[in-house]
Image: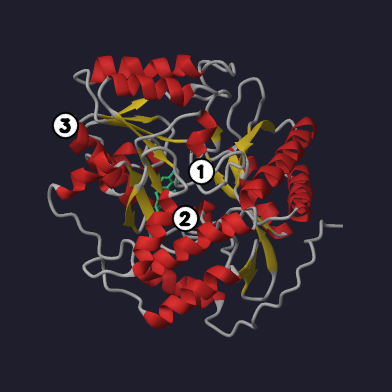
Amino acid sequence: MNPELPAFDFQPEPYTGLGKEEVLRLRQQHVSPGVFHYYKEPLMIVQGRGQYLFDEKGRRYLDAFGGIVTVSVGHCHPKVVAALNAQNEKLQHTTTIYLNPAIAEYASALSAKLPGDLSVCYFTNSGSEANDLAMLMARLTTGNWDMIALRNCYHGGSQSTMGLTSHHTWKFNVPHSFGVHHAVAPDLYRGRWTGEDSGPLYAGEIIDVIAYATPGKVAGFIAESVQGVGGAVVFPEGYLRSAYQIVRAAGGVCIADEVQTGFGRTGSHYWGFETQGVVPDIVTMAKGIGNGFPLAAVVTTPAIAKTLAERIHFNTYGGNPMASVQGKAVLEVIEEEGLQANAAQRGAQLLAGFAKLQEKYSVIGQVRGLGLMLGVELVKDRETKEPAKEACLQVFERCRTLGVLLGKGGLHGNVLRIKPPMCITSEDADFLLAVLDEALASA
Ligand code: PMP
């Protein structure tokens, strides 16, 4: 018998819209072929509630990927929906050329979540825009040009952030990395050093990059606090602390990309960088910040923020009333529902379950992650660690058939990514583990 989804007292509306084949046809004809879909047989999703998604036939799935780590507090959370609906009726947009309370209240609430001097927000609509601006501010504030990013990172798909991103799969064949240098990233599974104490050794790689590839001075360093698209790669303790020291000694500022790791997802801390004991100079956020609304932010110190006033910088939608109201409601729900603590508990439960599956199935090379930012890396052979991309796809497809939607990633496409909305329950986690067990058995 296949594992059964936990009971859920909610009836989706009967779906009466376009059929799936028609949607696919129109999409193929009129939406850029650059827009891809998951699964051999594409899945159509027409409704969502909490940690669940519903297809056009009313079938329910456990959403273990949260719209790519974006749905933080749950689909259509009633409080978030109510806040947005109220704003929708009142005022949708004016831009920042007039005063409106929403952006002011939200910026102040968001700043209060950050340590130190990080108290000034600039709102954008996507993570790429946020990282693009962070890089601009780093260059303006230091007067230096060179940026250090890490191999296996993802920071965006715009022309400038594509240059930061370090995966050939996301890079187009155009000039885009001028002034960006990639240092070897810590990787305790595949990397040169595998010890828990190797943080400073990996950070030493940055010294070399600065010495060989730059004039000895840099604008900044950017890193995800856990590499997301790269396959939930967790850095060893002390890595960012050493890295930040090295970068600051070379005149650079430190940027934490919290697009995936922010807002309690790592469980133990509200921000991923806190798990490494550092305070960045600039923090970028997107995805979970808005629970699905196109909202992103750069938060920095007053001194660095000033650089953007040197000329005119403008973002039409950034921090508009709708976005601000949604963002503020998300902050409140995370607090009110203890979602960070839940991320810690459910994350620990899942990780322990993955470790058991690892004992059972030799295809699992490593299980890793923090909170609800988890990865299961599949290999053909535990000795050679040859990536098992095909097996990964099979497991991924089978999980969908059994009712669990996962993500996948890693440079070799052999890492299952488990990053559900932070409201998943213990029963959901057990269900996910049972499904994964079944899928691994059949792969
Ligand atoms: N940074 C990280 C860590 C990301 O994962 C992503 C998106 N996958 C981005 C930045 C870019 O965000 P967006 O797609 O909103 O531009």
Q: Residue 49: x, y in percent?
A: 63, 68
Residue under pointer 1: 261
Q: Nearer the viewer, residue 155 or 377?
A: 155
Q: Residue at x 58, y 85 (%)?
A: 16
User: Is the residue under label 1 in contact with that under label 2 (CB below 8 Å)?
Assistant: no
Residue under pointer 2: 289
Name the side, left or right, on which 39 lies relative to 31: right
Residue most toward the left? 311
* Crowd rating for badge 1 (residues with CA inside 10 Å; few <14, some 14–19, many 20+): many
Whether residue 357 is visible here, answered yes or no, is yes
- Cβ(mark 1) to ligand 1 < 8 Å? yes
- Colour pattern of the rendering: secondary structure
Q: How far is disc 3 from disc 2 in space, using C-alphas?
A: 30 Å
Q: Given the image, on which type of amino acid does mark 3 rest?
A: Gly
* Sequence-first disc among 3 and 1: 3
Q: Residue at x 70, y 33 (%)?
A: 363
Q: Nearer the viewer, residue 355 or 410?
A: 355
Q: Given the image, on which type of amino acid does mark 1 rest?
A: Thr
Q: How far is disc 3 from disc 1 in space, using C-alphas?
A: 29 Å
Residue 169 higher or lower than 99, as above or below: above
* Sequence-first disc among 3 and 2: 3
Which labelled disc corresponds to residue 143? 3
Residue 81 higher or lower than 115, as above or below: below
User: Is the residue under label 1 in contact with that under label 3 (CB below 8 Å)?
Assistant: no
Image quarter of the C terminus: top right
Residue most toward the bottom? 16
Q: Kindly indicate the quadrant of the structure image that contains residue 245.
A: top left
